[in-house]
Image: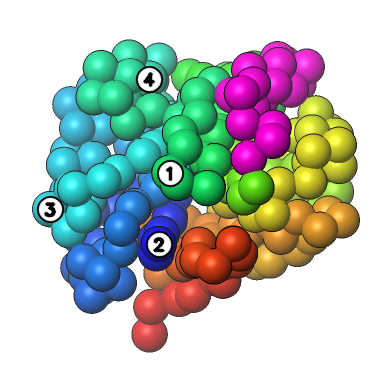
Amino acid sequence: MKIVAFGDVHMAIAQMRKIAVELASADLIILSGDLTHFGGRADAAKVVHAARTYCRQVLTLPGNVDQPEVLDFLQTEQVSLHREHRRLDDLAIFGCGGSNITPFRTPLEYEDAELGRILADAYTGVAETALQLMVCHTPPYATKLDRLTTGIPVGSQAVRQFIEQHQPQVCITGHIHESPGVDAIGRTKILNAGPFAAGGYIVAWCHDGTLDAELRFTS
């Protein structure tokens, strides 16, 4: 199975054309939050439908700058990973959208402890699954992936604690535009592709009992 993932789309739908070959060869596209730029259902529908023109199987979650009605839309479309999981053969995919509290009062923010509860709810029933892919818009605290340009870490301690405890093979995250890259907590590989308009995306493979992922950029 090939998965192509990207987030922090912010309506940069045209960017999909630059990775059209990758998207068309994917078995699944994952959109890891901030589909819109403070938009609602109509804008989210444009992004999801654009992704579906390349691959019919799409899963996604809302980011902190998506209006709460975006989550309702994703649930209605049965593509939401927020507080939910999916099983695809021996792979479990589970997720948490929104973000921890920011100074900007964006539309979908949670207290840090609530992010931990959302992840725990999403994880329920898949703990024994051999391969686990976590999709969380907010990165874990104090990694290469949650640093502002000042170097200050602004990720979630609850997300970090969840990863430390459960050790999914791969975690796809985003939210902090300044920190695209790859890091690890224990055995968990964590990837932040950065804002989609800047060309970052993730390709993950699941086959022969293994799950791995890499960060790529358009040329």
> Which callout, 2 or 3, points at the residue further toward the start of the chain?
2
The N terminus lies in quadrant = bottom left
Question: Between 116 and 125, which is closer to the camera in this rendering?
Answer: 125
Mark 3, Cα crowd under 10 Å, few <14 / some 14-19 / many 20+, is: few
Q: Amino acid at mark 2?
A: Met
Which residue lies under the disc numbered 3?
A: 53
* Residue type of the residue flagged with mark 1: Leu
In percent of the image, x 69 and y 32: which residue is there? 127
x, y percent for residue 5: 43, 56
Answer whether labels 3 and 4 touch (C-beta < 8 Å): no
Ranked by sequence position, the earlier of labels 1 and 2 is: 2
Provide the residue span drawn in magenta: 111-129
Question: Circle 2 — which element?
Answer: loop
Name the outermost residue toward the bottom.
219
With respect to residue 24, does 126 lie above or below? above
Identity of the residue drawn at 19% across and 48% down: 56
Q: Are marks 1 and 2 in contact (CB under 8 Å)?
A: yes
Q: Which residue is mark 1?
A: 88
User: Which residue position is annotated with label 2?
Assistant: 1
Of the residues under marks 3 and 4, which one precedes in the sequence? Answer: 3
Real-space Cα separation, disc 2 to disc 3, in angstroms: 19 Å
- Residue type marked 4: Leu
Q: Which quarter of the figure has residue 38?
A: top left
186 displayed left or right of 182 = right
* Residue tagged 4: 71
- Measured as percent of width and height from the top left, residue 42 is found at 17, 26
